[in-house]
Image: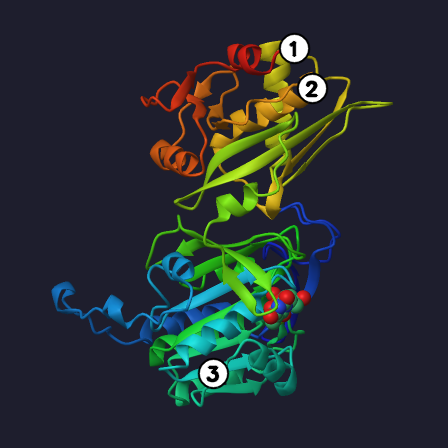
Amino acid sequence: MGKNTSQFVCQNCGAKYSKWAGHCNNCDAWNSIIEDLVVSEASGKNAISQAKTSGQILKFTKINEITVTSDKERLKTEFPGLNEVLGGGILRGSVTLLAGQPGIGKSTILMQICAEVAKKHQVLYVSGEESASQVKMRAARLGADSDKLVFVSSTSGNDIAKTIREGDFDLVIVDSIQTLAINEISSAPGTVSQITNAGNLIIQAAKSTDTAVIIVGHVTKEGTLAGPKVLEHLVDVVVNFEGDRYGGFKTIRAVKNRFGPTSEAAIFEMNEKGLSEVQNPSAALLAERQNTDGSIILATLEGTRPLLVEIQALCTTTNFGYPKRAASGFDLNRLNLLIAVIEQRTKLNLSDKDIFLNVVGGIKIKDSAADLAVCLAIASAAAGRKLSEEYVVFGEVGLGGEIRSAFRPDQRINEAKKLGFKHAIAPATIRDPFVIPVKDLRSTLIQYVNE
Ligand code: TYD
Ligand code: MG
């Protein structure tokens, strides 16, 4: 005991093993387990008996005497939507994890945030990925030009934490956590132990100096790769940057926020001047619409903001083997479930059809009220009949084929009205003259998309 030993850690979920294995039993990931060195510990008994006498009495404060940092002190970004996602701006002393696929635009949006915040406050941008001149090129392109914005290239967690502790910054960007290492641990940057320990060091430095820190974490398309998952527990705010890397809309949404709501989302578009917030996403998404069979307009919510998105389905005859089902922007399991409901509850035969589903504009739908639109799109494609252009659709579909209520129906309806739609095919629980109430899938399909 007492010497450095190694352990094997799943880089996806952080589960520990005593020997290497190709498959993680905890999270089912393959080839995610790698060797990690454990820092030596004093032998068990000794450590426990020491711990009994060590420690200090904590200084507590009456809850009504604790002073709160006012919301006014939040650092504002130039994007109102993003400020909302963050609960009103970046809170001092908070640590935010910005997670997203490589190339989605994390460094870009952070430089834009820096440019705005540095107009009034002291900002440090630390990059472990890019050199000063590379970052300068991006900064120049994005118009970041302030004496208060300083840059350093470093991959040392120790140095960055010390710089935060000793410096007087309002905001520090660390791009990215996967490149950092601390001296005390010998494993490579990007391993779970490096990410957790470097993350912890930086978080402590941020808390002790009331500095706001944003840490970048890369995730792969499947959401795998160590870091971010482990870090999620340590930081105050986790925002996910999602969407298509090449064109289309990108959304930033909070999945965890200790100081604000997690229901907001901001929608962005990348152009030559960096990212810009999309003012009227519904109109932009519907601009290129062709009303064909299989195309349905869904009134959904992106956070609390209503959004009209086109759902497209394509049905073709299966040539051999099992029918193929594919979805882009929609959960494949949910699609399979809905297909089963359609087959069972409406007797529409889809067993010899390949079904492809697409959500237009790179949007990823997580709203359960998308079910009815998906079912109608499939039925419309299978029957070769289109739905009237005047309708939007929303509602959840249960396993019995019943149509269930959706939350915030008023916002969905208002958005549809704003964009000139005449009616919404929606759950019967909603009392509104705009709504054509529907109760079950079978009668809805017969009425609206029957041959
Ligand atoms: P980047 O922010 O570097 O992605 P990440 O840090 O998430 O890995 O940039 C993503 C892409 O954006 C990159 O391929 C180039 C493109 N881009 C623009 O289209 N316009 C711009 O103004 C900038 C700075 C980048
Ligand atoms: Mg980057």
What is the x, y in percent for residue 380?
Answer: 63, 21
Q: In the rendered structure, which amino acid carries the disc numbered 3?
A: Leu
Q: Mark 1 and mark 2 in contact (Cβ < 8 Å)?
A: yes
Give coordinates of residue 52: x percent, y percent: 34, 70
Image coordinates for residue 254, horizontal then vertical, percent: 44, 55
Q: Which of disc 3 and disc 2 is earlier in sequence?
A: 3
Q: Mark 2 or mark 1: which comes first in sequence? A: 2
Residue at x-position 42% and y-position 19%: 436
Q: Which residue is found at the position 47% from the left and 37% from the top?
A: 300
Identify residue for label 3: 124
Q: Kindly indicate the quadrant of the structure image that contains residue 379.
A: top right
| Amino acid bearing label 2 | Gly
Q: What is the crowding at mark 1: few (fewer than 14 residues within 10 Å), some, or many (at least 20)?
A: few
- Foreground mark, 1 or 3, reads 1
- Depicted 109 relative to depicted 286: above or below: below
Q: Is residue 145 left or right of residue 103?
A: left
- Looking at the rendering, in which quadrant would you find the C terminus? top right
Question: Which of the two discs, 1 and 3, labels the residue nearer the N terminus?
Answer: 3
Tag 2's secondary structure?
A: loop
Q: Position of residue 8 (x, y in %)?
A: 67, 61
The reply to whether discs 1 and 3 touch (Cβ–Cβ < 8 Å) is: no
Q: Secondary structure at mark 1?
A: loop
Residue for point 52% across, 57% down: 268
Horizontal relation, residue 29 to residue 215: left or right: right
Vertically, is 295 above or below 6?
Answer: above
Q: Measured along the vertical axis of the image, is residue 219 above or below residue 418?
A: below
Amino acid identity at mark 1: Glu
Mark on residue 425?
Answer: none
Q: Mark 1 highlights which residue?
A: 451
Instruction: Tell me the CA gap for discs 2 and 1.
Output: 8 Å
Q: Dot 2, how many residues are within 10 Å of its Cα: few (below 14), some (14-19), or many (20+)?
A: some
Number of numbered discs visible in the structure rendering: 3
